[in-house]
Image: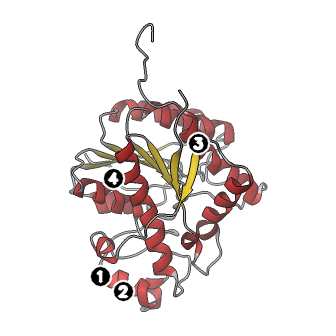
Amino acid sequence: MEKEKHSLYYSPDYCRQEYSFDTTRKARWIADSLDRNPIDKIRLIAPPPLSLADLCLTHSDAYISAIATGEPEALAAAAGVGWCENTLTAGLSVCGGVVAACRDAVACGGVAGSLSSGLHHARRDRGDGFCTFNGLAIAARDAVARGLSRVLILDLDAHCGGGTASLIDGEVRITQLDISVDSFDCYRSTAQATCVLVGAAGEYLSTLDRELDRVGREWDLVIYNAGMDVHEGDCGPAGLDSTLIACREVTVFEYFRQVPIAYVIAGGYSRGPGGIADLVSLHRSTLRAAASVPRGLSHPLPGV
Ligand SMILES: [Zn+2]
């Protein structure tokens, strides 16, 4: 039976930040690549932006005011991607896409995605590490507000998701599994958030397998932060190449084939020798895995 298309949320508003940098531009690069070279079973859809009221549930009024007005300048630009009059619009659109993908995945019991990035280092009262607002925590909070009680954030970006860990602390319906290759934004693991650092490419997939088995499949929703900066040409150890990353993507979508899963693109930078083309190709490996891994029973019934 042919699998239906899944929604991939994207709006040109994601890229309205004036400061031109991978995090503020690559959603458009990937969307453009899908125009030129579509991936079967993916349809691009523009999400509604997040409301200011919903943003206030996760970020402080003082920080939101700084992003809205540009004052104080140090706080408005703390994420490291500058500040302009469009920063708030871009942030609301990027986070709206994560929320839309999560609601979509839950509604269809399947897969949805958003070309959102720059999320997991943002804290309640400031941005950091190219992350303005924490769309992961915002979307997880939205999911529990809608009645879900078991939400897993799977963060496989190269860097640790300390911002997300700080924002979900105390919300027992949200759990984070964080496997990283760089200690930036690391944190002490708790019952809710586990931070694992991997130092060698040969241990990467085995660590992922072990940790997935530990957290299991009993989730109402998985939010997957699919960072590509684990690549050996970026932050990752030698040997962590595009083939291994493609295996990672298939592993994740196969493991959660019976669980609603929403993915975002997270980190990944064009500073390697392959530039933008290689970065886009890496992110497309997430989209391909999401589109191609069959959904449903992990062990088909005998004779079926
Ligand atoms: Zn990163």
Camera-side mark, 4 or 2? 2
Mark 4 in CB contact with mark 2 (< 8 angstroms) = no
Q: Is residue 81 above or below residue 229?
A: below
Task: Give the CA distance from mark 3 to mark 2.
Answer: 40 Å
Task: Give the CA distance from mark 4 to mark 2.
Answer: 30 Å
Residue 216 spot, x, y in % from top left: 34, 32
Task: Give the CA distance from mark 3 to mark 4.
Answer: 40 Å
Q: Which residue is mark 2?
A: 65
Q: Which mark, residue 188?
A: 4
Mark 3 in CB contact with mark 4 (< 8 angstroms) = no
Q: Residues within 10 Å of mark 2 (few under 14, many from 20)?
A: some
Amino acid at the residue labelled 4? Arg
| Along the line of sight, the residue nearer the viewer: 111 or 85 | 111
Q: Which residue is mark 3?
A: 41
Secondary structure found at label 4: loop
Secondary structure found at label 3: loop
Mark 1 in CB contact with mark 2 (< 8 angstroms) = yes
Q: Which mark, residue 298?
A: none
Camera-side mark, 1 or 4? 1
For the C terminus, the quadrant is: top left
Residue name at image x 42 percent, y 28 percent: 296
Q: Which residue is mark 1?
A: 61
Mark 1 in CB contact with mark 4 (< 8 angstroms) = no
Tell me if I can see residue 227 in this picture: yes
Residue 16 spot, x, y in % from top left: 58, 77
Amino acid at the residue labelled 1? Asp
Mark toward the start of the polypeptide (3 vs 1):
3
Camera-side mark, 3 or 2? 3
Mark toward the start of the polypeptide (1 vs 4):
1
Residue 6 spot, x, y in % from top left: 51, 45
Secondary structure found at label 2: helix
